Image (tube, grey):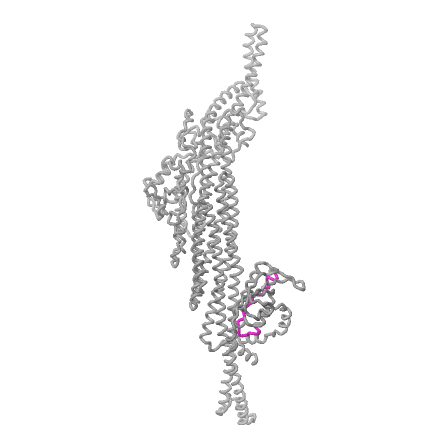
Amino acid sequence: MSLHNSFDTEDNPFSNMFSSGAVNPPLEQLQSNSNGNNELTYDYGNENEVEGHDDLKPQSPTDRSPSNFSSTTSSPTSSNINYEPYENLSKSMAITQPLQYLDGEKVTIKIVDTGRYTDPYGKKNAIGYVIQYNDKEVVRRYSEFDNLNKILIKLYPTIIIPPIPSKHSILKYFLSPIHAQNDPKIINTRKRRFQSFLNNCYRVQEIRKCIIFQKFLNPEYIWKDVLSSPPVTILPLNNLLAPPLNPTKPSPLHLLLPAPNANTKIESNLTIDRNGEDSEDTLIHKYDNQLYQVELRLSNYLSKFQPMSNKIKQNKFHLHSLSSNLAELGAYYNSLSIDYTKLKQLSMGIERIGHSFDVNYVSLEILIENINNLIEEQIDEIIGFLTDSKRVIIFKNLKILQYRIIATTIKKRSGRIKELRNFEEKLHKLDESFHESESQGDNDANLHHTQNRDILSHINERQVQLQLQKKRKKLKRPTTNLEPEFLTKIERTNEIERLTKEVDKLNECFKLVKKDISEVIASTLSSLELLDEFIEKKLKLMLNNLTQAILNWITESLKAWKEAKIQIDKI
Amino acid sequence: MAEVKAGIIKAGSSKEENLPIYKLEIIVSDPQKRTGDQGTSYVSYQISTKTDNPSYHKYNDDTKTIIVVHRRYSDLLLLHDILSNEYPTCIIPPLPDKKVFQYIAGDRFSQRFTQKRCHSLQNFLRRISLHPILSRSNILEIFLVSNEWDTYKKSFVANLPTNKEEVTDAFMNAFKAVNIQSEEFLEIKEKNDKLDHTISKLDSIYHKVVKKHDSISEDYAKLGTSIQDLTELVSGSNNDNLSKKLKVFNDGITQLSYGLNDLNKFLDFEYLVDLKDLEHYIESMRQLLKLKDQKQIDYEELSEYLTKSIKERDNLIAGYGSSNFLTNKLEELAGINQEAARREKINKLEIKITSLGTELEVAKKVADAFEQETLKEVSHFDGIKTKELKESLGNLADEHIKFFEKMLDTWTEVDKDLN
């Protein structure tokens, strides 16, 4: 059953809302909302007064703050640390190579340390991440980052929220429940990713100004208290029924809007053609192409990045096993060189070969580390962004759907009113012509006749009603769906009156939704475009960084082999 | 038997010092599939020889001419057999396995197989050319120079003795150990075992490395197509700059994939073959040591027998009967004249002892000579091995330098284009 049909039945929210004051969302999934709505008193006067969204223009790209790469004291793999005989190798150089930031800006928010941390209530032991911002330090833990992320998603349905690293896999907990939480590799990854998350948030004007985000960075606030106070506590259950750009601002009229979901469909033949006047075409189509382009591109990005991420992971695995083989080779050549201590030159030559393999191994390990930090994590982050962009697009589409539902309903209602009025007019004309023909006859009889006719018509009315009721029973349709000739005069006038009121309210909703839509589309578009731009910049940065990492690897290895060759030539 | 032994002693000792030293460089290349007379296919290798030995240049005037012949695997196998027959005290470099499996699988004309075998044959001939005795052999010259090798071949095959006897002999002695092993040989053996162990370890790791390189190179090929897709996607937008950058980067990745492939080809076709050949060479050396031990065992057994006989004779002379009181009693009962029998026995033993004495002397000479020869061989082996190690390690370093230099060029270019 299409939504439109359901909308035209008796339990249609727009037919009922003025008589009962309750809103029954057309879809059962949202029943939970209706209870809350019952308690609200409606004041429809100020529904247009939505403020505070003047800064909707797409933000300038210079606004973004750089994402972090190497500023963390990322530890090289443990094997590197133990690798003392080759201290002269500039491995530290390779890892802390000055890598480019986005737009060359400095990192605004830093995560300077990690460690065990007990929350102010002294209960839980977890890993805390020390955030440094504006010379202040605040400790937050994973679950708090997770909270912030979820709240921001609720708070900004039209803005793509930067992703946070995923939770520990259950498998890991299963394998080693004690160590999973303390795995330094994961902690380091999270440290980098959280820093990136905070700076990515900071980059977005809306989030930067958001009070919750600011409280998150402020050590004076205990996060639990932030969670148990507004605006977190008054977040709407369904963002479609709240002002899209400021969902915590009370707006009762929003509660009257229909709440479609992903399964909701509108009958395609019921498109609106009101001669361009107020038509959605002008409103939505203005952005249609732009939106379509950027949405298509982002979804293409997602479909390309996901397999690429897998390939890189696989490659990393292969490189890892290669590097361990290289380490073995180094060891065996070294032992071979010891076997030949009598032949000094040969022994030294073999030793250099072993050394070359050792260098190969260390520089490859560094390359792997770099691939992990500079590419894999970045791609994961981009995938996170792209996945969240889907949420924003879906919200926007639902909002458009909402708009269409209202427009369609208005059209239907107006049509019905027109139908009823036309019928009434026809009857009236018929009546008049009947009158005229009579009045042309006897004037005296006329008065008498009129009285008679009134009585007659009254009796007729009764009879008609009975007849109608019989007929209606055969049709088995609700009154609102009946052709006007099946209705009595009173019913008709009642319905016209009711529908006119409803259309008035609907028009108010329509105005509200129209405003919403333009806000949502503009905000969504700017957010999507910002992401598009961000991805391109990230890609460029990744290419540059990876090229640098590869060059480092090549240079180190080449140097070692050249030295080995010189020694071998001496044999 | 004695004649052969004398021959060995002669072959080994004298004629080396006075002979001039010639350069001899042999290159095996260009494996080609050919069809023989009976319509069967085989692989022919081009063997080019560069030498300043005048006897090689009978058919041409210029000693700088490179002599080129074509030989097949079975020809080299024959050369190997003839050499090992002619020079039993030398370590004849081993040939690559016959690889029966490849014959069955029909894989023996694949590039991988022929290239590897080609490199292995090259190692074989280079080892011979570096060996002071083997490099002077007539058969080698005929093999490297003659156009009528095929006619020679038939006569050689006919004359080649079968050496089954020695095999059983060696087998019988396989579980006997030498009583007194000189420290020198103990050390040689130990060194050999150690080297063998390390080389076989390296061999197995390189196999893994080759596999890893393969999968990494494959990864990059796949990644290349991914980036290609991305490039197309990006070029759809109005950002030509980024798509250009992606393209540049992708070219770098592709080059990396190719470079790894090339490096891998070297490792697989050449370096791994070098290692395998070295393992085989060590095994040949081990065989020689075993042969030497056997000569020594011969001598030791002989001398043991001699001392036994002498002891018996002495006992008889001293009048304590042979060994057994019971046999003496029995002989007494049988009415044998004990005194006469004793004399006869002593006489027999005397004859035995003198003949044993001379034989022992010969055996001692053979064993000592063999030992000397073996020591010489070991030093030849060490020399050849060192040269070989130097060359193969040099190649290894060169190939790595080549790979990294190429990558450095490629990626410096990429870096330049990106900025």
Residue B96 appears in the figure: no
Dividing the image into 4 quarters, which one contains the C terminus of chain A? Answer: bottom left
The relative height of residue B15 versus residue A73 in the rendered view (above or below) is below
Residue A161: image location, x then y, percent: 43, 39
Question: Position of B39 compared to B374: left or right?
Answer: right
Residue at the right extreme of this rendering? B38
Quadrant assignment, res A220? top left
Pick whichever, B29 or A278, lies toward us.
Answer: B29
x and y percentages locating residue A342 in the rendered image: 42, 69
The boundaries of the magenta stretch are: B84-104
- Residue at coordinates 53% horizontally, 47% vertically from top-left? B225
Tell me the chief SS of the magenta region.
loop
Q: If the image is split into quadrants, where does the N terminus of chain A sit?
A: top right
Residue at the front extreme of this rendering: B61
Question: Does the magenta run of residues contain B103?
Answer: yes
Q: Is residue B191 magenta?
A: no
Percent position (x, y) of residue A114? 36, 48
| For residue B209, above or below residue A409 | below
Residue A139: in sight, yes or no? yes
Q: Nearer the viewer, residue B373 or A268?
A: B373
